[in-house]
Image (cartoon, rainbow, N blue to C red):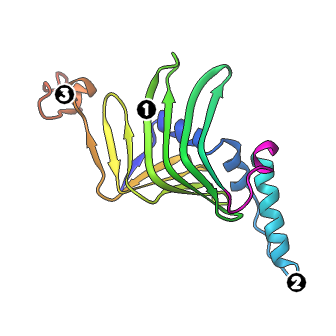
Amino acid sequence: MRFLSPPLLRSALMLLLLGGLIAAMAQEEERPRKGKNKGKRTRRDAEEAVQRALPEELTKHFPIGREFKGVSIPSYEGDRLKSVMNADTVVRVDDQFLDLVNLVVHVYNGQGEPETTISMDEAAYDLIAGELASKTPSKIEQPRFTMTGEKMIYQTESQVARLVGNVRVIVPDASNMAPDFGFPGSAPATNKTP
């Protein structure tokens, strides 16, 4: 199991999950349910949490069981494009889960140029727990490296992404990555470590 926490990856995945959606859902307090309205109250609480987290324009047009095709959601920081999340289909399975197919997130740098691409064929997003989990192998691509794993799990509250199972990192030109790390084919470190 490998832990990834570079700021760029955290930003991309956090934006992917529609920012405030997760924060509101993760902070939702669990209360014990009693009586005959237990199911109705749980459903109502989940709907209220989603409505607080997502803009009303999205929630009123996002019924359970409906498939949305060709979804593209940009994210901005001020007037600068930060990322674009594209999915061939998004389905709200129930009050708790979204299923995403062919999910690709493009993350842009400060100059508006594409910098990182995160892709997964199938993923599920837990609205209550604030967790995105791929159901298929996932890939993170940057000009400096490509990283793949059998599954990616991103927890929004801690802002930590994990690649699990058969994780591979491919560094095309290791000499430019970090000369002091002693990658094969790179020059040896010039300074001694204490």
Q: CA distance from mark 1 to mark 2?
A: 50 Å
Q: Which mark is residue 131?
A: none
Along the viewing direction, whichever of 120 and 9 lies nearer the viewer: 120
Q: Is residue 168 magenta?
A: no
State the SS at label 3: loop
- How far apart are the alpha carbons under marks 1 and 3? 33 Å
Q: Amino acid at mark 2?
A: Gly
**Which numbered disc, 1 or 3, marks the residue that appears first in the sequence?**
1
Which residue is label 3 attached to? Answer: 192
Circle 3 packing at 10 Å, graded few (<14), some (14-19), many (20+), is few
Please identify, in this view, whether the residue under mark 1 or under mark 2 is nearer the observer.
1
Q: Does dot 2 land on a helix, a strand or a loop?
A: loop
Q: Give the class, few, some or many, for how many residues have Cα within 10 Å of label 2's Cα (few <14, many ≥20).
A: few
Q: Which residue is mark 2?
A: 35
Give residue 79's quadrant in the image. top right
Task: From this view, report whether residue 69 is shown above or below residue 11.
Answer: below
Q: Position of residue 140 (x, y in %)?
A: 39, 41
Q: Is residue 51 left or right of residue 93?
A: right
**Residue 135 place in picture, x, y as percent:** 45, 60
Q: Position of residue 3 (x, y in %)?
A: 41, 49
The answer to whether residue 143 is left or right of residue 190 is right
Query: Could you classify mark 1 by the number of other residues whose Cα lies within 10 Å: few (under 14), some (14-19), or many (20 or more)?
Result: many
Q: Tally the marks.
A: 3
Residue at the (26%, 27%) spot, across then down = 178
Residue at mark 1: 116
Vertical comparison of 46 with 145: above or below: below
The amino acid beneath tag 3 is Lys
Query: Which of these two is toward me, 109 or 184?
Result: 109
Stretch in magenta: 55-66
Name above or below for residue 130 compared with residue 39: above
